[in-house]
Amino acid sequence: MSKKNTTLGAIHMDTTEQNGFTAKTLLEEAAATLDERGLDYGHPAVNIRRIADLWASYFGREIDPLDVCLCMALVKISRIVETPNRDSFVDLVSYAALAGESVIGDWDRFRVNN
């Protein structure tokens, strides 16, 4: 299988990486990734709130879960600009979904155990 670079704006991906890469499969992979990581790390609300607490302590100001999700998404965007790959897109979609859930969902029922 030959590797051919495809350019979409500033993004370059090998055609081998693009096979089967649709919006629907990307969303499905993101959902599966959230499920898998949930088994390892618990509900994302707990981990993201813990990150928010740690960042708030470090920066000396309040950080909420939405801030964490958006900043993590920006990390993924930065990586995509440098080296686009399927995993980074899956993670980006996951953080976008978590950002929405953190605002619209019921994360108040999850508490961080310090």
Image (cartoon, grey):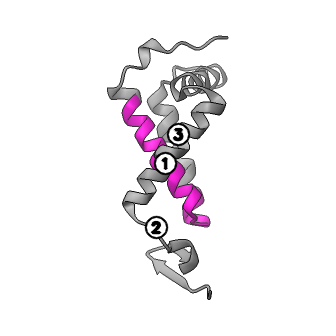
Q: Decide which of tag 2 and tag 1 comes sooner along the chain.
A: 2
Tell me where residue 88 appears, x and y as whole percent: 56, 56
Say what amino acid the circle numbered 2 marks: Phe
Say what amino acid the circle numbered 1 marks: Ala
- Contact between labelled residues 1 and 3, with CB atoms less than 8 Å apart: yes
Say what amino acid the circle numbered 3 marks: Leu
Front-lying residue, 106 or 40? 40
User: Element at badge 1?
Assistant: helix
User: Element at badge 3?
Assistant: helix
Q: Decide which of tag 2 and tag 3 comes sooner along the chain.
A: 2
**In the figure, 74 relative to 109: above or below?**
below
| Residue drawn 64% across the image and 29% down it | 41
On the question of residue 89 being in view, the answer is yes
Front-lying residue, 73 or 26? 26
Judging by the rendered image, the residue that carries numbered circle 2 is: 21
- What's drawn in magenta, residue-wise? 79-101
Front-lying residue, 24 or 70? 24
On the question of residue 11 being in view, the answer is no
Q: Could you say which disc has been placed on residue 34 in the image? A: 3
Asked whether 97 falls inside the magenta stretch, the response is yes
Count of numbered marks: 3
Residue 36: image quadrant is: top right
- Contact between labelled residues 3 and 2, with CB atoms less than 8 Å apart: no
Disc 2 to disc 3, how far (Cα)?
Answer: 18 Å
**Which quadrant of the rendered structure holds the C terminus?**
top right
Asked whether 107 falls inside the magenta stretch, the response is no
Q: Residues within 10 Å of mark 1 (few under 14, many from 20)?
A: many
| Residue drawn 56% across the image and 72% down it | 17
Disc 3 to disc 1, how far (Cα)?
Answer: 6 Å
Judging by the rendered image, the residue that carries numbered circle 1 is: 30
In the drawing, does residue 20 fall left or right of residue 75? left
